Amino acid sequence: ARMLITEENLMTIIIKTFMDHLRHRDAQGRFQFERYTALQAFKFRRVQSLILDLKYVLISKPTEWSDDLREKFLEGFDAFLELLKCMQGMDPITRQVGQHIEMEPEWEAAFTLQMKLTHVISMMQDWCALDEKVLIEAYKKCLAVLMQCHGGFTDGEQPITLSICGHSVETIRYCVSQEKVSIHLPVSRLLAGLHVLLSKSEVAYKFPELLPLSELSPPMLIEHPLRCLVLCAQVHAGMWRRNGFSLVNQIYYYHNVKCRREMFDKDIIMLQTGVSMMDPNHFLMIMLSRFELYQIFSTPDYGKRFSSEITHKDVVQQNNTLIEEMLYLIIMLVGERFSPGVGQVNATDEIKREIIHQLSIKPMAHSELVKSLPEDENKETGMESVIEAVAHFKKPGLTGRGMYELKPECAKEFNLYFYHFSRAEQSKAEEAQRKLKRQNREDTALPPPVLPPFCPLFASLVNILQSDVMLCIMRTVLQWAVEHNGYAWSESMLQRVLHLIGMALQEEKQHLDNVTEEHVVTFTFTQKISKPGEAPNNSPSILAMLETLQSAPYLDVHKDMIRWILKTFNAIKKIRESSSTSPVAETEGTIMEESSRDKDKAERKRKAEIARLRREKIMAQMSEMQRHFIDENKELFQQTLELDASTSAVLDNSPMVSDTALTALGPAQTQVPEQRQFVTCILCQEEQEVKVESKAMVLAAFVQRSTVLSKNRSKFIQDPEKYDPLFMHPDLSCGTHTGSCGHIMHAHCWQRYFDSVQAKEQRRQQRLRLHTSYDVENGEFLCPLCECL
């Protein structure tokens, strides 16, 4: 295959042939697919075999590179970029307002193409990673193509200036909910993959002069992936309901295990790349603008006005969901550093983390676990090499399936906002982890885990957590929660803000633990959250608001998390002050924490005391009622006592009859006391003594012909009407077998039940008649209790 690449330029030929077959393009030169009919699907399958040829060519990676191989591979890479350029921005969609979309747009062909190319894109990146010269050239080519794509995407966007907290940034006016947006961005995703390889192979640090890093425009890099993620957030908020199922399916596949490695994951990496090169305040303002939330956070008291003026619940709900999604995106940008090259980790750490989070939901069988992990081009997940380190195998019991269970020591690596969780998986995992903590008598807080450090190329990403705009967003949401009646806010919004504060504290603690003498820690989140707000609002500090929320009765679920945050804050303060010489603040912090803990204890004690007094009061009331009833019905109680006494006296005086004196027959026969039998009808639940004069009781029974003891099985009864089953012929040709389940009914109850079964069978239409196990015409029925014949 390598010989064919070098001598016959096979890569370029395959890709160009493939593109010749896909001739339908729009005005911008992007692929345009016809309706995905059976014929279209058949043609498309024929063309797809070319992708398999390309995969075959790339599957064996070179160990040594010749100049010819470099030249031909890069020529093939150029052709591949042309293919991706035709996919960049294909199938654009616009939000339907007013009426529902009339005809579902074609989307399957584009996703089929994306799925088929996923492994080829991954293999292209693997080839580039093997040679530094090839990687640098490929990076330059990919960037040039992306610039061309962006050149044609103006859409008449106007420039605007955004400003919050004294920071301002120039950007373009663009609303995802009004303009065209596409989910297909393979060129920018390929560039994200190559950028990570520059970091992983350290080419970025060795040859910075050979790379066009100074030419990169971070706002351009983040624009389209950000639009794509905003689209997902708006779909989740229910803003695109009128666009039908085609969009829902596209979003599903975007996050699905088959596509996410070269779609969703790469969009997150591209945003991380952009943020690491720009002022985090500028990025957050652009992000607020794209999420259409800029007004809410840039205008003081906008939230209060908004919730009082607009009574339309849908709009409030949509905005709440968008704020939650935006905070979730910030958590992902700072927390997702398990890709080699983004964080200082290797490939096995990435797989371990995937498995830990899948097993946090519930124990899983091997097959179930494999399905949830992404496969490489050889259909391998890499699970076998790491599973022993993170899970115990529980042998199959009665269920017949062996299960992998997460090791308890791995639970500390659980991240509630893991980016590959679906909504349902996230809530299941949260519930399972809280339940586990309650069983172990621990706090139910789920703090963010300690994360590995970023690679130098991405190191500045953490500053997003301590940027002024981020602190403004945190302060605003906490303010809404403190004055919870006047604002439209949600608990999951607050939960995300608490998680972000926890992440920032963990980050600062790590910085302090790893600091050397000559370095100064520039991450000063604890100092910033201790300061109150600016002059016009004079809002309290973030720390003060957290203390207020700790005693809020409507936030019981989050108390443990707030307590953990305050405890971590005090621990960081101690570390900072052990290096300086001011113990005053430390003691204040400790006193504050202790007083809050005492308050909690006292509150619990008070509640327990109230419950005890209430129980005692109820018991006293019951005993008083008992006494009162006995006083009112004295005669009855007296009669009962006398009757009991006389019965016991009779029993004591009755003569003991020995077995030898008993007479069975004749005039002097001994009277044997009859045993009284009480039974309950299974239909009317009435209990009754079995007596001759009482209502007749019947057993559900099944009578059938039996030949178990027959000596002549060939004999047939000639005239069944005249045949007496009680008279048995010596050859025992056939007998009667009666079987019963033992359930007893009143005769009239049974008759009523059997009549209703017959009526139901007659009412049932012939065409709907199912094959039943009994035949009503033969007088058969199922026991109403156990459903035996």
Image (spheres, helix red, strand yellow):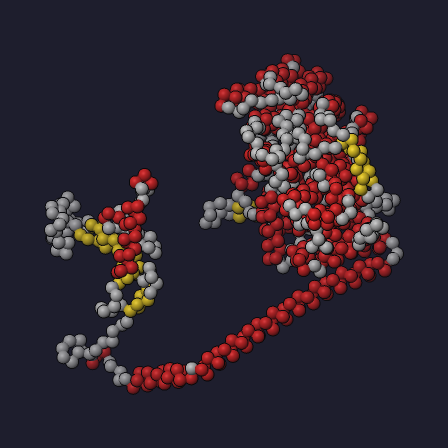
Please state which of residues 363 and 143 is positioned toward the viewer in this rendering: 143
Quarter-wise, where is residue 574 in the image? Answer: bottom right
Is residue 194 left or right of 378 when viewed as pictured?
A: right
Q: Residue at x 26, y 57 (%)?
A: 751
- Position in image of residue 428 (x %, y %): 58, 48
In the displayed structure, 56 sits above or below 500; it is above
Question: Visible in this render: residue 514?
Answer: no
The quarter of the rendered structure image containing the N terminus is top right
Please state which of residues 14 and 255 is positioned toward the viewer in this rendering: 255
Q: Residue at x 66, y 25 (%)?
A: 88
Please state which of residues 69 and 452 is positioned toward the viewer in this rendering: 452
Quarter-wise, where is residue 66 in the image? Answer: top right
- Position in image of residue 86 (x %, y %): 65, 22
Q: Seen from this angle, which residue lies furthest top?
A: 8
Is residue 714 left or right of 98 when viewed as pictured?
A: left
Is residue 537 left or right of 349 when viewed as pictured?
A: right
- Position in image of residue 156 (x %, y %): 73, 26
Figure label count:
0
Question: Visible in this render: residue 599?
Answer: yes
Please state which of residues 376 and 310 is positioned toward the viewer in this rendering: 310
